[in-house]
Image (cartoon, rainbow, N blue to C red):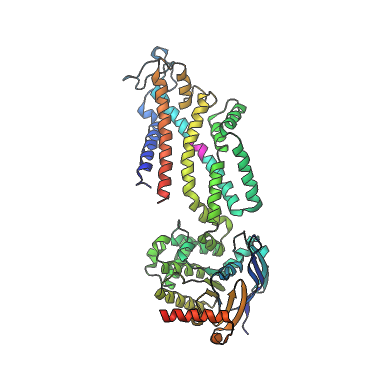
Amino acid sequence: MFRNPIFLSGFFIIFFIAFVCVFAPFITSYNPNAIDLKEALLSPSSRHLLGTDTLGRDLLARLLYGGRVSLAVGFVAVGISVLIGVALGSIAGFYGGVIDEVISRFIDIMLCFPSFFLILSLVALARHPSLYIIMAIIGFTSWMSPARLIRAEILSLRQRNFVIAALSCGLSQRRVIMRHIIPNAWGPVMVNATLSMAVAVLIESSLSFLGLGVQPPQASWGNILLEAKECLGVGWWMSVFPGLAIFFTVLGLNLIGEGIRESLHK
Amino acid sequence: MKEEILSAKNIEVLTAAKKFILKGIDLQIFSGEVLSLAGESGSGKSTLALALTGLLPASLKLGGEIIWQKRRFDLAALRKDTLSSRMLHGQISYIFQEPSSFLNPTLNIAAQLTEVFIYNQKKTYPQALDLSRGLLELVGIKEAEKKLYSFPHQLSGGEAQRVMIAMALAQRPKLLIADEPTSNLDVTIEMEILSLIKNMQQRFGFAVLFITHDLSLVRYFSQRVVFLKAGRIVEESDTAHLKDISNPYIQSLLEAAEALQDYE
């Protein structure tokens, strides 16, 4: 995997973005929420590398701290969805019968809702959602595709010889699932998880752009763009840089997913 | 007469489309004997092996019962009764053809061998590791220490089958079901594996149900043989009197075995 050029390029993009976001205080000395109206709307310069916004806040600082939020939402949301998806999918795939039927129909029902509008209405219901609620909402509305994937994998793995052998050794079903089936289904799930992390980052940005996600003054890439929309004509830097940040994050995650997929098929 | 350890009564296996794969199978296995189960491909030998402990895929319907060490198990109920099947699987071990596909590709040999000791026999990890190393040496694996930390794809077919035998022995089985254990190995290794199974059988005294389509192996390996054709038992005999059977099916199997020997 670490020899695959696609995976590597994606990995370095994401590693770089995550690194600068995590170590933001060492990279910029500005407070992302410090308002300084005298400095408002400055274009990129040596004092403010990426310029400032309408309230005079340093854009680089807001981008880096906002990146923490966006990446954390993506990561945790995908974690939740993979956890739920793997649990339900493997139960459905292994036990089959009525259990499988119930879980599969539930997945079908969940897939009927256009997910973004489902998220929108859930967020609206929550009024002023905290970061954690947004993570949970995205996670709880996106577990269906890992669930389906792992169910399909397990249906085929369950007939594989080494699973029969493990059962013939008298090991418990739970142990066979945890130790012999799920690890072998892990590859496609990892691909799916990285790709859906890209989607989760996009959803968070879209929500914040609509003013429903992360609430100001806390920065996220989406709400920086929302503020930038007001002055698209005078401050191009305010919309270009957060746009690029989202673009490269999604690109990097997609490259990682593609790279894992390629190395699995070798 | 020897003591009967497994007796199968009226075993039936049907596909979802109600087609019979096995019909009305009655079978007795006595303690410490080697019973061969012979038949052409597609006659249901492997299905019967798995059916005996309820290991078949859920899509197949299973009927009949077995009496294992004087306890009666209804096979259809057994598949749902995880406790009884675990008990049964702890005492009846399997080895299969294509041994490497029966090892989990994501775990090394040590992890798979110690599992049996740790989870079924409640040993600690260091104890389990010692026992596993001992077993690998017992089944004739060279550099057992190194092989413990190998993954299945790093083993040859013969080594993988020895590991499977070690795994089967780990459970101290009363019955070993060997489903064409050598059909994918070359001839020299075939004889090594067979004599290994025979040695272990004599040493530990378990019974063996030996499944094969090769009648020359049947004579070498076992005292009694049951013939299966199209899902039914057609003949049962001592291996010494194979030639006396007039059944044309068995004669054709015998001729095939002899023709093969001449060819070799």
In the rendered image, residue A77 lying in the magenta stretch gets the answer yes
Residue A80 in picture, x, y percent from top left: 54, 40
Give the quadrant of residue A47.
top left
The residue range painted magenta reads: A73-78
- Position of residue A151 relative to residue A241, above or below, is below
Which residue lies at the image location 40% right of the left edge and 44% below the top edge? A259
Residue A25 in sight: yes
Count of marks overlaid on the render: 0
In the image, taking residue A139 as reference, residue B129 lies left or right, namely: left
**Residue B247 in the image, given as x and y percentages of width and height:** 59, 82
Residue B224 is situated, as x and y percent measured from the top left of the image, at: 57, 81
Question: Can residue A220 be seen in the rendering of this structure?
Answer: no
Q: Describe residue A42's horizontal placement relative to residue B172 as left or right.
A: left
Q: Is residue A150 above or below residue B204?
A: above
- Please identify the dominant SS of the magenta region: helix
The location of residue B29, given as percent across then percent down, is 60, 77
Corner quadrant of residue A175:
bottom right
Q: Please name the residue shown 59% across and 69% down the image.
A: B48
Q: Is residue B39 magenta?
A: no
Q: Nearer the viewer, residue A10 or A172?
A: A10
